[in-house]
Image: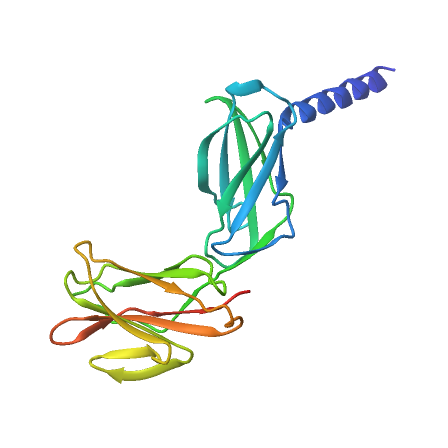
Amino acid sequence: MFVLRYLVLAATFLLITSTASAHVELISPNGGEQLRGQQQFTIEWYDIVNHGSSVTYDLEFSSDRGTTWTPIVQNLPYTDGFDSYTWIVPDVDTLVGRIRVVMYLDPFTYWEDTSEGNFTIMASYSSYGSGTPLNGVEPSLELHNLPQAGGNIAVHVANAQVGANAHIIAGRMAQNSFQYGVTLLATTDITHRIIPVDNNGEVFVPNALPIGAVGVTVYIQAVIASAPTFSATAGVQFMILP
């Protein structure tokens, strides 16, 4: 009788503690989703135990199944216990992505929930080739916005020589030829634009993607003109999406 009573009490305690710990639940992404870097995705969660308007929420992302976490947003306000946040998916490749929501009642009282399974992210852009540093600094090249047909992307060069000319080369084929002291990584059959580097060492170049180019792979490189040679970034390639 004593053993039975002990087991009942233990089971009751476990039920109470497990119920008490589940104050918030992540709805999406909860595993199995296939995401694309730089797309918009709605993270959704709700309060299992409603603590009212005094709570706040933090959202975090992991690309390694929860081993490490990166903040997405902090101190989101309460909105009636059913909440969502529009997330710009990071431009990384991973097969084991997770999201975690943390609900804070105060700095010392909080509850959390994590995606039950992994979701995948496919990067919208990938780098190729190697750059040529100038005075020990290699300019960086990034592309912003999802590369969808009919949409717009932005070429962003940073850490470039102020006042130099940036040659933005785009083509439909990769290239590996040595000219002007640098390796050219892209053909020029789409565009070759020359834009001065601003006082912050940056260049932003907007580009419209044609509607009828779905499935076309584009190669882009930025070459920074400097005397007596050039300085080239690594190339970036992407496929135009529907």
Residue beneath the point at 16% across and 76% down: 229
Q: Is residue 175 above or below residue 50?
A: below
Residue furthest to the left in view is: 227
Q: Is residue 131 left or right of residue 19?
A: left
Q: Quadrant of residue 49?
A: top right
Q: Position of residue 40 (x, y in %)?
A: 51, 49
Residue beneath the point at 63% across and 44% down: 30
Which quadrant: the C terminus? bottom right
Q: Position of residue 188 (x, y in %)?
A: 34, 79
Q: Is residue 34 above or below residue 234?
A: above
Residue beneath the point at 19% across and 74% down: 230
Is 3 or 106 nearer to us in this picture?
A: 106
Residue 134 in sight from this viewpoint: no
Q: Is residue 181 above or below residue 89?
A: below
Residue 62 in sight from this viewpoint: yes
Q: Is residue 7 left or right of residue 40?
A: right
Which quadrant: the N terminus? top right
Q: Quadrant of residue 84?
A: top right
Q: Position of residue 164 (x, y in %)?
A: 16, 66
Is 59 or 224 nearer to us in this picture?
A: 224
